Image: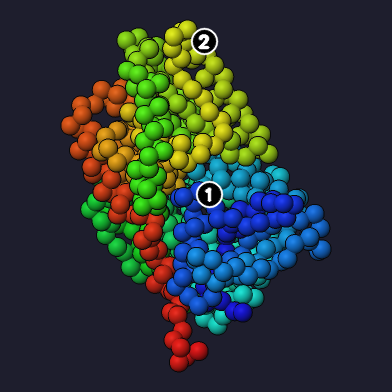
Amino acid sequence: MSSDMVIVYHRQPYEEVEENGEIALRENKSPNGIVPTLKSFFSKVDHGAWIAWKLAEDPENPDFDKKIEINDAYGSYSVSRLALSEDQVREFYHVTSKEAFWPILHGFKERYNYDPVDWANFQSVNRQFAEAAAAEAAQGALVWVHDYNLWLVPGYLREMRPDVRIAFFHHTPFPSADMFNLLPWRKEIVSSLLACDDIGFHIPRYAGNFVSVARSLFDVDVTERTNVPDKWIFEGTALTERIWPSAIHYDGRDVAISVTPVGVDNEYIDEIARSPETAEQTQDIQQELGEMKLILSVGRTDYTKGGIEQLNSFERLLEFNPDLRGKIRLMHVSVSANRNMSAYEEIQTEIEQIAGRIKGRFGRLDWQPLTLISRAVPFAKLVSYYQAADVAWITPLADGMNLVAKEFIASRIDGDGVLVLSEFAGAAVELADAVITNPFSNRAMDLTILSALEMPEIERRQRMKNLRQAVRETNVRHWVPGTLRLKPEKKSASAA
C-alpha cells in the first residue's frame, strides 16, 4: 500500500526485545525521543511509512522481513527495514557521520578526520534509503527526511520521484561556511538539501548558517526574510539572531527554510512528576541530602557536552570556596554515547580521572563532593532528581537544542530550582530566564554556578515561572514544523 507520508530516519520506530525466545516490538521508552513525536504525524494521513536500517549478517539474505505492517495508537503504517551489514553501519554511521560530520557540525575541527571515510559506502547507504522511500511514497506524497547522516537522500529521491514533496529536519547545530566548507563533499551535500521543498532547523542561527553555506557554493537567492520573535531575542546568548532567511530560490525551485524548536512532552513529565512514587523517591533523595544542596548535571559522554570543563569548574569552586565543602554535592550523569569510538572512551576516562581527583582532594569520611554515574538513569528516577536538585547545571560546548534543560523545567512543579545553561545550547535562545554561562570561560562558569547556589528564593521562583511558560510554548505534542505546510490531506470517503 502506498503512503501519503514517508518518514526517513535511521532508527526503527520501536524497540525490539526478546520474549519467550521471540522478538517482540515495544514502544520506545524515552518520553522525549524524536521517534514518538514523528509517529504521531501518521494520524494525519490514511497510511504512512517509516524507513530505517536494521543490522543483518547477510544483507542479501537477512533473517528478518524487510517490510512489516504496524497498526498501533499512532495509526496504520509500514516499516521498511534496510538490511545493512556491520561494516556498512560502521562506515556509514560510526566513521563518516561521527568522525567526519559530527565534529564539523559542532565546531570541533581539531577532531575532524575524513581520511578513513568510505564516501562510496555513505552514498550507497543513502541511496538505499532514497530507493525505499521512492517505493513507498504515493503520488505527491510528503517524504520527511531526518538528520545529517541522511544528507544525500533528498538529492537521490528528487531524481527518482520528482512528483513527491521532500522535507528535511536538522537535529544538530548547523555551522557557518568557514566551518562547514572544510568537508570535501560540501557541494554534493548542499546540492542534495537544495532538492528539498522545506529544510527545518531548531533555531534561526542554524537556518541562517545553512543559507550562507548554500550561497557560498551555489547561485542561491534569498526571496524572503522573517523577523525572529521578540521572545527569542535577548542579550546574553551567543546564538541570538534578529532575522532569518525563510525562503530561497535555486535552480528554478523555491525552498522554504523553517525554524521550529523541538520541545518535551510536558503532559507526560507532569504526570510522572505528580505521581506518589516520584514524590516518595524525591523525599528519599532530599532526606539523604539533609542540609546539602544538590547540583545535577545530565548528558552524554561526548566532547561537545562540556563534561570535563564542568568538572574542572566544580573543582575550582571547592578549592576557592572552602565554606561550601560539606554543604553541596554534584551528581554528574555522563552516559556513554558510543563505546565503539576511541574519542568517547578518552572523554570518559578523563571524566573519571577528574572525578577521582576531586574526591581525593576534598572528600571526607562524612561527605563526598560528587557522585559520577556512567549509565542511563530510568526516567522516572531522573524526574525525582530533577525535583530534588537545587541547580541543574547544563553546559554543553555546542548543542543543537538540549532537551535535558527542558525536562528539568517541566519537572519542577514546585516552581523552584535554578537552571544554569550554556549560551551555546540551542535551548538558550528560548530560555532567557536561565542563568546563562559561557563554558569556554573559567570565570563565567565559576561565577554562574556560585550565583545559582546563592540565588534568593523570590528570584528563583520568578525565573522558573517564566521558564515553565517558555517550555509549555514548545510542547512537543504541539510541535508544528514548517514541513507541515507541505502535508498531504487525508482523502475523503468520496475520493476514495
Coordinates of residue 22 in the picture (x, y in percent): 73, 55
Q: Earlier in the sequence, mark 2 or mark 1?
A: 1
Is 470 above or below relative to 412?
below
- Residue at 36% in and 52% down: 267
Indicate the amino acid at tag 1: Lys
Is 368 above or below relative to 91?
above
Coordinates of residue 208 in the picture (x, y in percent): 39, 56
- Residue at 42% in and 44% down: 402
- Residue at 37% in and 39% down: 276
The kind of secondary structure element at disc 1 is: loop
Report, in whole angstroms, how far the alpha carbon at label 2 lies from the one at label 1.
Answer: 37 Å
- View extreme (top): residue: 365
- Viewer-side residue, 17 vs 62: 17
- Viewer-side residue, 336 vs 197: 336
Is 32 above or below relative to 109?
below
- Viewer-side residue, 80 vs 288: 288
Q: Which mark is residue 360?
A: 2
Is 407 above or below relative to 215?
above
Please tell me whether mark 2 or mark 1 is closer to you in this view: 1
- Which residue corresponds to mark 1? 29
The kind of secondary structure element at disc 2 is: helix
Instruction: Bin the neighbour count of mark 1 within 10 Å (Cα to Cα): few under 14, some 14-19, many 20 and up.
Output: few
- View extreme (bottom): residue: 494
Coordinates of residue 5 in the picture (x, y in percent): 52, 73
Indicate the amino acid at tag 2: Gly
Residue 102 shows in this picture: yes
Residue 436 shows in this picture: no
Instruction: Bin the neighbour count of mark 2 within 10 Å (Cα to Cα): few under 14, some 14-19, many 20 and up.
Output: few
- Taking the image as shown, residue 1 lies to the left or right of residue 46, namely right
- Taking the image as shown, residue 214 lies to the left or right of residue 187, namely left
- Residue at 49% in and 55% down: 34
- Viewer-side residue, 474 vs 413: 413
